[in-house]
Image (spheres, rainbow, N blue to C red):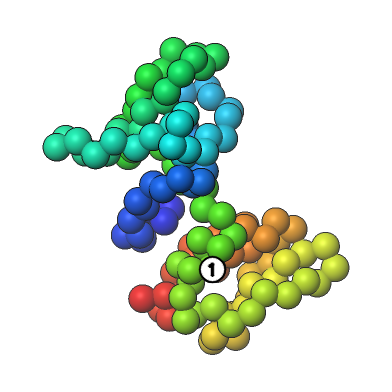
Amino acid sequence: MLRSQGRHWEPTAGDRFVIPGRDIDDVFVVADMTIEVEHLPTGRLVHFNGTTEWALDSIPAEEVLWLPWEHQLRTLLGPAFASLTRDGDRFVVTLADGTSFADEDVESAYAAALLAGDPLLG
């Protein structure tokens, strides 16, 4: 979804991602020793080092789905972000225009705000 909004992901150590459409339920983390991103003339390649449970050595970065952390989502909101509060068991992200988005998962609340396509997000 963020990709469809024109938001570019440059994978760095610590970033999480999944591989949709391959019957792999694992969440992977980019790490210097186990999962590296190679920059090739044909594009970025996510390379899996070492032994894994399934036969996959590498995959084009465009085929993986980034799962941003809370701090990354807050950064993407930029000046549109006003506050994060709790309301019972829900996290509430409020934007500078007063619009709010709530979810039991803090990252989902941030993501909802981003995906709403608020004009403040530029």
Residue closest to the far left? 41
Viewer-side residue, 57 vs 104: 57
Along the horizontal axis of the image, is 54 left or right of 25?
left
User: SS of the residue at dot 1?
Assistant: helix
Residue at screen point 51% across, 17% down: 52
Residue 91, horizontal then vertical, whole percent: 72, 66
Viewer-side residue, 57 vs 7: 57
Residue closest to the far bottom? 97
Q: In the picture, residue 40 is in which quadrant?
A: top left
Q: Amino acid at mark 1?
A: Arg
Along the horizontal axis of the image, is 19 left or right of 92?
left
Q: Quadrant of the C terminus?
A: bottom left
Residue at screen point 77% across, 64% down: 90
Residue 68, horizontal then vertical, whole percent: 52, 53
Residue at screen point 46% across, 18% down: 50
Viewer-side residue, 119 vs 16: 16
Badge 1 density bin: few <14, some 14–19, many ≥20, Cα 10 Å:
many
Residue 30, horizontal then vertical, whole percent: 46, 39
Does 90 appear above or below 46? Answer: below
Does 58 appear above or below 79? Answer: above
Q: In the picture, residue 82 is in which quadrant?
A: bottom right
Residue at screen point 67% across, 74% down: 84
Q: In the picture, residue 102 is in which quadrant?
A: bottom right
Q: Which residue is mark 1?
A: 74
**Residue 63 seen in this snapshot:** no
